[in-house]
Amino acid sequence: MLACAPARARADVPGPLADFQAQLSAFAVRAPGHVAIAVQDVATGVMTGINAGAEMPAASTIKIPVMVEVFRQLENGRFDLNRRLHLQATDKDCGSGDLCDAAVGGAYPVSQLLSLMIDDSDNTATNMLIRLVGRQHINATMDDLGLTHTRLSDFIRSEGPIRWALRSSPADMAHLLQSMAKEQLVDEWSSREMVDILREQHINTLLPQPLPPGTEIAHKTGSLHDTLNDVGIVYPLDAAQPPYIIAVMTTDLSSLDAG
């Protein structure tokens, strides 16, 4: 099973999300750079936001689609989590993560590379997994899910013209995360595993900060040059409230501190 449910009309926004549209509009007016935001109720699929369908530089949030394709191929039996990949010199990118300092030829299981890619945002681990599953397969799976703004046109390179080679939209990211939260992305086991990996995120200076203390979030950040993003599943402190998705993507920032 591999499906993303379509979002319902913004007019149907219920309960806690009902006031978000005005708040987001006010934020977007005073925010630096170009801002795109999607907020989606997991239970109903209702989405609100600002420029939610805008195609934006994805930076490291593109690592979520890479993870999805890894689990899709796991489910198809192409390899398992214990499969070991050997580090190649061409995998290395030192823009994020420590694996770029490791010796060429070292072997790492897929399970470890997934954690490094998501929780430490390790670019080298990401490139190893892209090499394993193939960029064309990542993009084809996003097409199958109807996520037409999500594209990986190159390996992860922190230098050079990479800004638009990794792209997505808040709405695309919200659809992915909603399906994951509903345990409908790839299959139930894969969805749960992916959410668990996202829960272990080590970079928590963005989305978690404005949320009430103790709020649980499974998320992935992304920053590159003038781009700062964070997308995640938020689990309200009130267990009676369903989880919701927040996807914030910003670009054309004067500095990353401005985000």
Image (cartoon, rainbow, N blue to C red):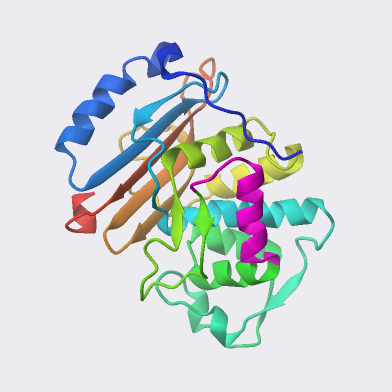
State the residue in front, 239 or 182.
182
Task: Tell me where residue 42 sits by quadrant.
Answer: top right
Q: Residue at x 74, y 73 (%)?
A: 84
Residue 212 appears in the figure? no
Q: Residue at x 75, y 61 (%)?
A: 81
Q: Is residue 13 left or right of residue 259?
A: right
Residue 255 appears in the figure? yes
Q: Residue at x 66, y 66 (%)?
A: 134
* Prevalent SS, magenta region: helix
State the residue in front, 35 or 106.
35
Can you give x and y, in whole percent of width and height, for residue 132 in the image? Answer: 69, 69
Task: Tell me where residue 77 sits by quadrant.
Answer: bottom right
Q: Residue at x 43, y 44 (%)?
A: 169
Can you give x and y, in whole percent of width and height, for residue 201 in the image? Answer: 49, 51
Can residue 123 be found in the magenta stretch?
no
> Vertical placement of 203 versus 154: above or below?
above
Can you give x and y, in whole percent of width and height, for residue 90 in the image? Answer: 55, 83
Region rendered in magenta: 133-149
Q: Is residue 65 left or right of residue 160?
A: right
Q: Is residue 188 left or right of residue 54?
A: right
Can you give x and y, in whole percent of width and height, for residue 27 in the image? Answer: 21, 32
Q: Residue furthest right?
A: 77
